[in-house]
């Protein structure tokens, strides 16, 4: 499962960059202290890593792609992406609307029906397949 390790490492780096880039779309960027902002980036990046790991494992189990990544790569990539997007909708809704752990700035584009931020959804639509393909590309040849 060296491929899974490479994927998760790439995903963590990509999510760290994404979290930093989308900070101005959250009120924390405008209202938080540097320490609060740093903690939020760390917290969210670690959470992204957990979502990525669970999504990949769930996708692998759901698709039955026991020969992954040599066989079933596409099925696992699609399922992992779907799991990540689904988790994002639920977690953003819980954190913004129910628990009020963070809030969107006016500049954040929001998606109906829950008002979920567009950039977190794009994050999980784009980063898992890109990082999976990159991890596959850098895989050592046998």
Image (spheres, rainbow, N blue to C red):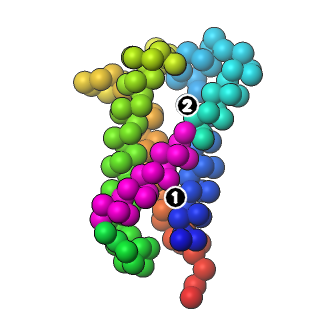
Q: Which residues are magenta?
A: 47-63
Quadrant for residue 97, please give it.
top left
Q: Main secondary structure of the magenta part?
A: helix
Among all residues in the image, which is located at the extreme right?
A: 35
Q: Position of residue 122 (x, y in %)?
A: 42, 40
Q: Residue at x 31, y 69 (%)?
A: 64
Q: Position of residue 136 (x, y in %)?
A: 51, 71
Q: Work out whether residue 78 can be spotted.
A: no
Q: Is residue 51 magenta?
A: yes
Outermost bottom residue: 142
Instruction: Give the structural element (helix, strand or loop) at label 2.
Output: loop
Label 2 crowd bin: few (<14), some (14–19), many (20+), radius 10 Å: some
Q: Which residue is label 1 attached to?
A: 131
Q: Quadrant of residue 67?
A: bottom left
- What residue is disc 2 on? 22
Camera-nearest residue between 44 and 123? 44
Secondary element under disc 1, as helix, strand or loop, is: helix
**Residue in the foreground of this view, choosing between 110 and 88:** 88
């Amino acid at each position: 499962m060296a491929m899974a390790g490479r994927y998760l490492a790439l995903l963590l780096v990509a999510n760290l960059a994404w979290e930093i880039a989308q900070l101005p779309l959250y009120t924390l960027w405008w209202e938080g202290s540097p320490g609060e902002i740093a903690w939020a980036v760390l917290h969210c990046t670690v959470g992204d890593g957990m979502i990525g790991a669970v999504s990949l494992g769930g996708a692998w189990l759901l698709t039955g792609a026991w020969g992954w990544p040599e066989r079933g790569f596409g099925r696992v990539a699609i399922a992992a992406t779907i799991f990540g997007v689904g988790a994002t909708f639920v977690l953003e809704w819980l954190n913004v609307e129910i628990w009020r752990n963070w809030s969107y700035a006016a500049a954040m584009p929001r998606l109906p029906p829950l008002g979920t931020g567009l950039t977190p959804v794009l994050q999980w639509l784009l980063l898992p397949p890109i990082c999976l393909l990159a991890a596959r590309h850098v895989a050592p040849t046998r």
